[in-house]
Amino acid sequence: MIQLNNVCKAFTNKKQRIKVLDCLNLQVNTGEMIAIMGRSGAGKSTLLNIMAGLEHVDEGQYFFHDEALSSKGREALATFRREKIGFIMQHYPLIDTKNVTENVALPLLYGKHPKKDAMSQAKKMLANLDIGYLEDQSIETLSGGEAQRVAIARALIQDPELILADEPTGSLDEEAEKDILDLCVHLNRAGKTFIIVTHDSVVAERCHKIYKLEDGRCLESPTGLIKKPLKSDDTC
Ligand SMILES: Nc1ncnc2c1ncn2[C@@H]1O[C@H](COP(=O)(O)OP(=O)(O)OP(=O)(O)O)[C@@H](O)[C@H]1O
Ligand SMILES: [Mg+2]
């Protein structure tokens, strides 16, 4: 599905030029669920933004199903993003002047769907994710786990092929994290390809493959070998 070939990306701030991605290669196949780990500032969000068509590469190529996105213009990338990508972030940026259903319907409304149809699709999506009971609720009354489920419903509403998740459980407690992870695994088994950026080995270990982003490149790490944090009931 995704092929990144020798991708380079640098940013220039007032003081210096920062090389973030340096001849990075990565292939993600349809149906995979992969994790990308790496220290803060390693370039994980930059990499996701490139895959979402939000950032251009400086050098190298980005193919999505054999379509070269590195050479596309802003409009074409916006269309690509709207049709193919679902984006989930750590701080689920929901709009708190709109209720849950309106938030989930938003991408359809931006795509000029009639409001009645968009709202009914949003309600169906909420029901599919077992949060139909939240449909009329206001955003500021949601728990962190519920807000992230609503954000996932919004990311899924246009039936994207690829879900990009940037630390999707970073703001959640252990129980809500497990809940969201179970949902991601369920959606992946139902056919969605997932790329998850995470600092958390518990999240990474639920994925098929783990990549470490280091020195501007992605290296595959063997799964099952990441040291898991000890739980309070673990014996030493
Ligand atoms: N638009 C930008 N302009 C200038 N520098 C940027 C820009 N975006 C990212 N950077 C720099 O690129 C580097 C990589 O940033 P990025 O956000 O991709 O890291 P990250 O791996 O996601 O980190 P974290 O784990 O903290 O979220 C950082 O040094 C950051 O300051
Ligand atoms: Mg980041």
Image (cartoon, grey):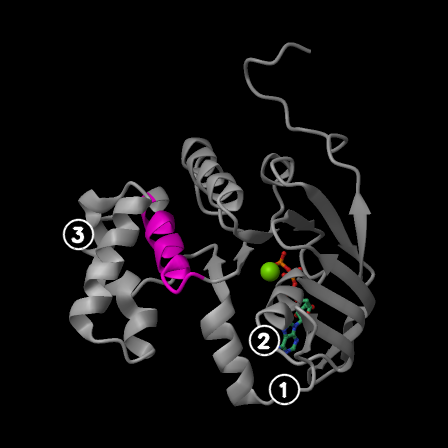
The relative height of residue 52 versus residue 151 in the rendered view (above or below) is below
Amino acid type assigned to the residue bearing label 3 in the image: Gln
Few, some or many C-alpha atoms within 10 Å of disc 3 (few <14, some 14-19, many ≥20)?
A: few
Q: Earlier in the sequence, mark 2 or mark 1?
A: 2
Q: CA distance from mark 2 to mark 1?
A: 9 Å
Of residue 154 and residue 140, the one placed in the foreground of this image is: 154
The residue drawn where x is 74% and y is 82% is 15
Q: Which of disc 3 and disc 2 is earlier in sequence?
A: 2
> Mark 2 belongs to which amino acid?
Gly
Which quarter of the figure has residue 22?
bottom right
Circle 1 is placed at which residue position? Answer: 72
Q: Which mark is residue 137?
A: 3
Type of amino acid under label 1: Lys
- Residue 53's label in the rendered image is 2
- Give the mark toward the camera: 2 or 3: 2
* Viewer can see residue 96: no
| Residue 10: numbered disc | none
State the residue in front, 122 or 18.
122
Magenta-span inclusion, residue 206: no
| The residue stretch that appears in magenta | 146-159
Crowd band around label 1 with a 10 angstrom C-alpha radius: few (<14), some (14–19), many (20+): some
Q: Is residue 183 visible?
A: yes
Task: Look at the numbered discs 2 and 1 and tell me whether their residues touch, using CB distance below 8 Å.
Answer: yes
Q: Residues within 10 Å of mark 2 (few under 14, many from 20)?
A: many
Residue furthest top in the image:
235
Q: Earlier in the sequence, mark 1 or mark 3?
A: 1
Q: Is residue 160 above or below residue 172?
A: below
